[in-house]
Every structure is written in C-alpha cells, then in structure tokens.
Amino acid sequence: MEQPATLSSAARRNEDIALDLLKFIATTTNVGRPGAPSTGFTAPQSAKADDQVIHLLELYTRCLEVVQGKSGAR
C-alpha cells in the first residue's frame, strides 16, 4: 500500500534530489577535490579545506532552490 505524500516526505525527497544533483555537479567539475600532484611548476593551492566546504554548502543550497522551483537571480 502506498502512503500519501506528506509535507515532510516531499521535503525529504527534494533534499535527496538536491544532494544527488550536488554530487553530479561536484563529480563532473571536480569541485571540492584537491588538484593532482605533479612535478615541475604548479599553481599554488588557492582553496583551503574550509573554503571548499563553504563552496559545497552554497552549491547544495542552490541545488535545493532549483529542485524546489525557487529561481534566484544570480
């Protein structure tokens, strides 16, 4: 038997979809991953771990807004 969708289950579903969207974007764009070490000249590591976490949380918030249908002008 299927249960009717409640507000909390719908919100949870949106959160799951937003998380999957975040994972897809982060994986395809290598967001949140350190650069591969290489020999020779390399660019300095500009993003600290804290900065990467903040960036990922902002990205998750944007993904959740998109899934919920809220359009923000950015």
Image: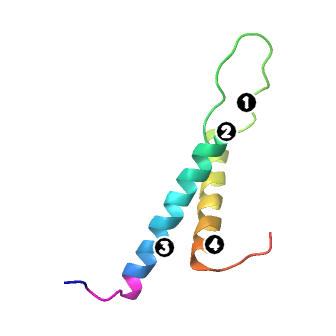
In the visual, does 59 lie left or right of 40? left
**Badge 3 is on which residue?**
14
Q: Secondary structure at mark 1?
A: loop
| Location of residue 40 by image quarter | top right
6 up-or-down from 28: above or below: below
In the picture, which quadrant includes the N terminus?
Answer: bottom left
Q: Earlier in the sequence, mark 1 or mark 4?
A: 1
Tag 2's secondary structure?
loop
Colour mapping used in the image: rainbow
Q: Which residue is mark 1?
A: 45
User: Upstream in the sequence, badge 3 or badge 2?
Assistant: 3
What's the amino acid at mark 2? Lys
Residue at 63 percent across and 72 percent down: it is 66
Please report whichever mark, 2 or 4, sits nearer to the chain's N-terminal start: 2
* Nearer the observer, 8 or 53: 8
Picture residue at 71% right of the left edge, 10% below the top = 39
Determine the image quadrant of residue 48. top right
Determine the CA span between mark 3 and mark 4: 10 Å
